[in-house]
Amino acid sequence: MRRALSTFLRSTPVRATLRTTPAITLPFMGSSPSSTMSYPHQKSESEWRAVLSPEQFRILREKGTERPGTGEYDKKMDPGVYTCAGCDAPLYKSTTKFNSGCGWPAFFEGIEGAIVRHEDNAWGMRRTEIVCANCGGHLGHVFKGEGYKTPTDERHCVNSVSLKFKDESAGGKSEL
Ligand SMILES: [Zn+2]
């Protein structure tokens, strides 16, 4: 029996076997979330276009990037909370923002559970994309081990366009 099986395996082209196997995705397989992952806050493309500016749509929904040094929150250090420009979910506290000098707002840590990461291999680079866990809106990328003097040694490099700032007096409490 064992011999028959090994003979069978040896004589079967492995690639052909894999190709004919139906792709089954099991929820417990723990694969990293992809851009096809569904998020709680769902909108169709036309619905997003209706509520976002063209620039917000380009960045949040089409993974664009604002030009460095042009974002309205790049240098902002006021106390408050940064929420998602697409769905208003709180993403970052101002207490985790730091001046990286890179030309985009930088945070060393997201609000717990608010940010989803996945691998981004676009443009021939291996990077970690960060998106809003509630709506899947593209925020930017996260980089680790660059040597910034922050508690996490991570830099969440986020487009200002993807964010909305709420200062503390407007209810954007830092101690969320
Ligand atoms: Zn969102």
Image (tube, rainbow, N blue to C red):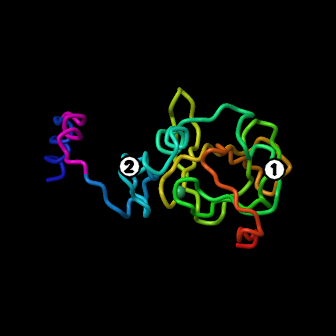
Q: Which residues are magenta?
A: 13-23
The numbered disc on residue 56 is: none
Disc nearer the start of the sequence (1/2): 2
- From the viewer's perspective, tell me whether residue 7 is left or right of residue 143: left
Asked whether 100 falls inside the magenta stretch, the response is no
User: Circle 1 sits on which residue?
Assistant: 98
On the image, the x and y values in percent for residue 25 come to 30, 55
* Camera-side residue of 3 and 28: 28
Looking at the image, the residue that sits furthest to the right is: 149
Q: Main SS of the magenta segment? A: helix
The quarter of the picture where the C terminus appears is bottom right
Q: Residue at x 81, y 57 (%)?
A: 151
Q: Residue at x 70, y 61 (%)?
A: 166
Question: Please, what is the three-letter code of the amino acid marked with disc 2?
Answer: Thr
* Camera-side residue of 64 and 125: 64
Q: Quadrant of residue 101?
A: top right
Question: Please, what is the three-letter code of the amino acid marked with disc 1?
Answer: Phe
**Whole-number angstrom distance, CA of label 1 to CA of label 2:** 32 Å
> With respect to residue 101, does 47 lie above or below?
below
- From the viewer's perspective, tell me whether residue 64 is left or right of residue 152: left
